[in-house]
Image (cartoon, grey):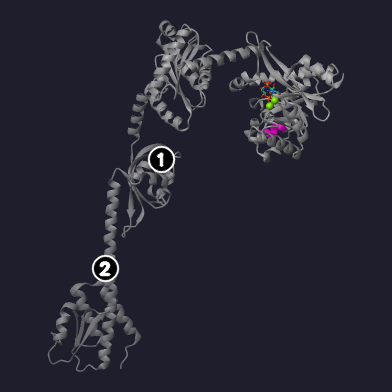
Amino acid sequence: MTLLPLSDYLGDSAALCDAVVRLRGSALVAELGRIASAVMASPHGLFLPAASAAAATSAAPPAPFPRDTPALLQEISFDGHCFGHYSVAGRPVYNDADRRHLASLASLTAGVLQVHSLAQRSTHAYAQVEALLAQQTQILDQLHESVLTMDLTGYITSWNKGAERLFGYTSVEAVGRNILFLYDDEDTGFHDAFLEQGGRLMEVRRRKKSGEIFWASLSLSPLQDLDGKPIGLIAYLTDITERKLAEERLHHLAYYDPLTSLPNRTLLAKLVDQALSVAQRSKMLGCVLFIDLNRFKLINDTLGRRIGDELLRQVSLRFRQALRDQDLVARLGGDEFAVGLFDIGQHFEASMVSQKLLASLVEPFLIEGHDLRVGASIGISVYPQDGQDAETLLRLADIAMYRAKQDSGGEAESVAFYSQDMNLGMQARMRLETGLRQALSEQQLLLHYQPKYALGSGRIIGAEALVRWHHPQHGMIPPAEFIPLAESTGLVVQVGEWVLEAACAQAQAWKQAGLPPIRLAVNVSAREFTAALPARVAATLARYGLEAAWLELEITESTLMHNIERVIGIMDRITALGVALSLDDFGTGYSSLSYLKRFPIDTLKIDRSFTTGIPTDASDCAIASTIISIAQQLHHKVIAEGVETAEQLAFLKSSGCDEVQGYLFSRPLPAVEFEKALRQNWGL
Ligand code: C2E
Ligand code: MG
Ligand code: MG
């Protein structure tokens, strides 16, 4: 076999590749024929493309070779695909080596044709896809809407020109970032919104590159791959800010009073009805206050509408400031306002709010050099007692307001409930409250002292100071009748200040009279138990030159229930002064035993309700003796209050109680009598 030099092979292949890449149709056919003739050193060489090759195989050798000339025919195929045939002729003989030589050329040609056709096909397909994509992008970009796509986790995958125009970000800036960067801060996350809204159309707030927030209508539809598997979302957004603003303006016109910007009657009714359904679920009361200004008409008529309007604006501001954020205030028209109160537990709180509103009007209004004074009449209706819906409640509050105005002759500030019962209750409370303020300023309060005895020695070791109100008409009023009211109005703080002062003054008098040092216990209510208390106690002791050992504070278990850490801090500062603390009414609250050991207290005071049951009620006995043993474990002293019988005393003694206080020994006594009892007890 004759082998061609390598350079010839390379030359042939190069010529072949060059032909296949460069030429098409008959030019390619002719060139391949020429290459075959050259490679085979034959006068004739043909390339017969596949269609005519089929005929050639059955009727070899093909024209135009002379019939008698020997010729070679070789199929050109790759992987079963036939591209055609080579045919050479013109030499006198062709041997086996020539046959193999032509076969190699055919195989090389088949390979090159195959690669070329594959490359051509994919280039074509690619160009088609490119063209399609370019077309679609063009369509998307032509749309005025902004269209963007994102993957399932919210990362932006495409961004059209509309989106560029709307948001101000180019697609280079936006693609690859998470969609959340376009959200207004108030918006909830991407998933929440989509999960809630699904593919529906929704209105959302978005942020532009400039920082501007705008309203957009957003429609989301799922983006799927060829198998229908979800791979993301397509979002279409249109700016609807204009429409939204128009809607808001309309809404404002429909629901707000243009003069004061307060809700109008329509909105009030809506909001009240909503709030009532919440109040119903939480078993709370709701109150509607109908407020009518007094003397407004006169001002408006004499000074003119401009001043009248300004006055209404300022009144609305004062009302808003006097109320808590969750309270509703509306202007019904003219000089009429309404207030809705919801999370309240007892109806009398509404009368306290009414007083606050009236108080907010006391300061005169200074408008254009005029010093203007207006008052108001307020009517209150209560849900659910008086009515179940906003309209009814407003109507009844209006009626109550008229009654209030009539009762006061239309001039004075007045408040009335629609319900007569509530009215009577309110009037009684108001009388009591004014009375108590008067009692404080006119020295109608006084202290009685109930001795406390040490069980071991039988000695009086102290006294509890108990406040009384000597009313000029009603005589002696016990604290149970005015302390709870004073607590709800906050007046208890002033009462408490007075009591501490009076008890220290009394202690100083007894100290100077040479009486033995005893502990005077003062009751402190939860409202007084603030961070300011320790300093006040220290200052009062100092003013009277009293040692701290003269003073003890009784606090109730309920004081301890809120904000334990804060309470412990205050207690620590009180005991650091040397003032003792005792826990009053012990057993009636729910002190946790684990906290109990952290409280810096000296004495546990067994509540009278348990003492009463001794010795007949087994559970009272058990509770009393348990309290005594808890006190012993925690190294506290223990005192029983309300001891009225010898049996009770005997039980307490045998259980290990340290001290007692009760009618069996003494009732609370006026100071002079207590002093006598003390001297007698100490044999002075
Ligand atoms: P408390 O601190 O538990 O006072 C004990 C109450 O039980 C006193 O009633 C006292 O008179 C009464 N008492 C004592 N021994 C007996 C007895 O053997 N039998 C009966 N039936 N009662 C007895 P009072 O003086 O009416 O005080 C009632 C509550 O008023 C006090 O309960 C205390 O919580 C409050 N309180 C009294 N004075 C003040 C005060 O100055 N400030 C504050 N914040 N609260 C006070
Ligand atoms: Mg007490
Ligand atoms: Mg008590």
Q: Is residue 624 visible?
A: yes
Figure quadrant of residue 497: top right
Amino acid type at image mark 2: Arg
Residue 104 appears left or right of 454? left
Residue 179 position (above or below residue 349): below
> Could you tell me residue 58's position as x and y percent?
14, 85
Which is nearer the eye, 663 or 404? 663
Closer to the N terminus: mark 2 or mark 1?
2
> Could you tell me residue 659's position as x and y percent?
77, 29
- Report the residue at 43% width, 6% height from top: 298
Which is nearer the eye, 190 or 237? 190
Give the residue pinned by disc 1: 208
Amino acid type at image mark 1: Lys
Please, what is the dominant secondary structure of the magenta stretch? Answer: helix
Please provide the residue range marked out in magenta: 567-571
Which quadrant of the picture is home to ligand 1? top right
Query: Mark 1 falls on what kind of element?
Result: loop
Dot 1 alpha-carbon crowd within 10 angstroms: few under 14, some 14 to 19, many 20 or more: some
The residues tagged by marks 2 and 1 sit, at their Cα atoms, a distance apart of 45 Å
Marks 2/1 in contact by CB < 8 Å: the verdict is no
Query: Residue 199 magenta-drawn?
Result: no
Which image quadrant: the C terminus? top right
Give the residue pinned by disc 2: 121
Query: Mark 2 falls on what kind of element?
Result: helix
Which image quadrant: the N terminus? bottom left
> Could you tell me residue 556's position as x and y percent?
67, 29
